[in-house]
Amino acid sequence: MIVIEGCAIATVDAGGTEHADGHIVVAENRIVAVGPGPYRGDASVTTVDGRGCLATPGLVNTHHHLYQWATRGYAQQEILFGWLKELYPVWARLDAGIVHAAASAGLAQLALTGCTTSTDHHYVFPRDGGDLLAAEIEAAAEVGLRFHPCRGSMDLSEKDGGLPPDSVVEDTDAALAATKDAIDRFHDRSFGAMVRIAVAPCSPFSVTPRLMEEAARLARAEGVRLHTHLAETVEEEHYCKEVHGCTPVEYAERLGWLGDDVWLAHAVHLDPAAIAKLGATGTGVAHCPSSNGRLGAGIAPIRDLLDARAPVGLGVDGAASQEAGELGAELRQALYLARLRGGPAALTARESLALGTMGGARCLGRADELGSLEAGKLADIALWDLNGLGHAGIADPVAALVFGPAAPLRLLLVNGRAVVQEGALSTVDTSAIAGSLARAARGLR
Ligand SMILES: [Zn+2]
């Protein structure tokens, strides 16, 4: 058993319960108690001194492209379409070694910034590239994060009116077969699963309607979730209107891609009807504020989506459009963007923390296992150290975490295991990972 005590606790449960000074008890991979004051049970347990710290649920990253850690810093002044066109030919040379190096780096950075569960949306599978999904799943097991790789796909190339070149798209049937294979090999349906697969054709301008429809049928037959990019840019909206005669959300609806088993990356350009539809269908949104800023894509209407009761989580997005890859920092970015759009009352610090925790758990269909600190849930816990220069003197610990600079972690538990201790990873060697990443990036360039 592990007992964390002496810390402030923001449980992010349905009632917003907080303790100014409380304790959390962990047995194996579960939380068994959360409460105020010191722990008064068995004295032989391992105790973590949480004084000056804030315990929150581990953060959930709802959108990423880990392979992009090997292609950071490209296309620095481009909008999405120009950025993609510069990067597609580079990504055509990916292989399993590069993906392992990039995924290790991206996941290590996520763990160091409070993330305990991450998705990944991998949609580039060059012929002869090797087993890319297995490579990133291996990296997640080494770093120690709970992992939801989304088997992406693209089957609409330039010659058929899409954006990507032939070199990075797959045949429709081959993509569907490989997706089914990924579910058979890796998807774990059990409570507390460390790996779950989602079905994830890439975007309206790189995927045929047939692949979208058949992917949705496959996912529902297998009981796995659906993920894709939608309504990210004005250019995508123009594309949908021109090619399909409707908005991106109407297009998704037509293809069977709205529902409480779907979450969409970005959802920036939404009219009121689209917001109402996402809310009514329980379709989730992965909000990626830094990526939207880097590509100048726009500001997602997060306040309106929350008011419409759509699940909203946070995502760092791929590191080629968000070189920092820090999930903790997205709490502040989300708050800033919401306020730039809707004024200072548009999002509170506690609402931002809820996006990064329970909102993400809802997007992944795991609200009964993750996203809040409650007895019975999985022991995915971030213990943020607020003793230092960046946070000292801020009376409200949640405000310190969200408004302040990125806080170091005294402890990060994933499934009850200490993945970060005193600000450093205890599972992998970050300098070795940085070395492999630099070699992989140089090789691609
Ligand atoms: Zn993305």
Image (tube, grey):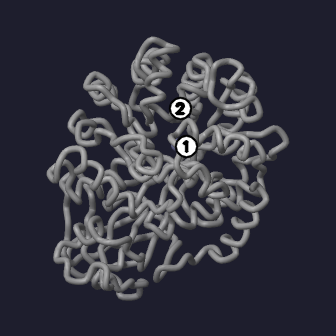
Q: Residue at x 71, y 58 (%)?
A: 100
Q: Residue at x 71, y 31 (%)?
A: 165
Q: Name the image quarter holding the N terminus.
A: bottom left
Amino acid type indicated by mark 2: Gly
Q: Name the image quarter holding the C terminus.
A: bottom right
For disc 2, the marked residue is 223
Percent x, y of residue 162: 63, 24
Q: Residue at x 42, y 39 (%)?
A: 266
For disc 1, the marked residue is 189
* Residue 52 drawn above or below residue 153: below
- Asked whether the viewer can see residue 439, the reply is yes
Amino acid type indicated by mark 1: Arg
- Asked if disc 1 and disc 2 are in contact, CB closer than 8 Å, the reply is yes
Q: How many marks?
A: 2
Most foreground residue, 288 or 36: 288
Q: CA distance from mark 1 to mark 2?
A: 9 Å
Q: On the image, which quarter does residue 362 sit in?
A: top left
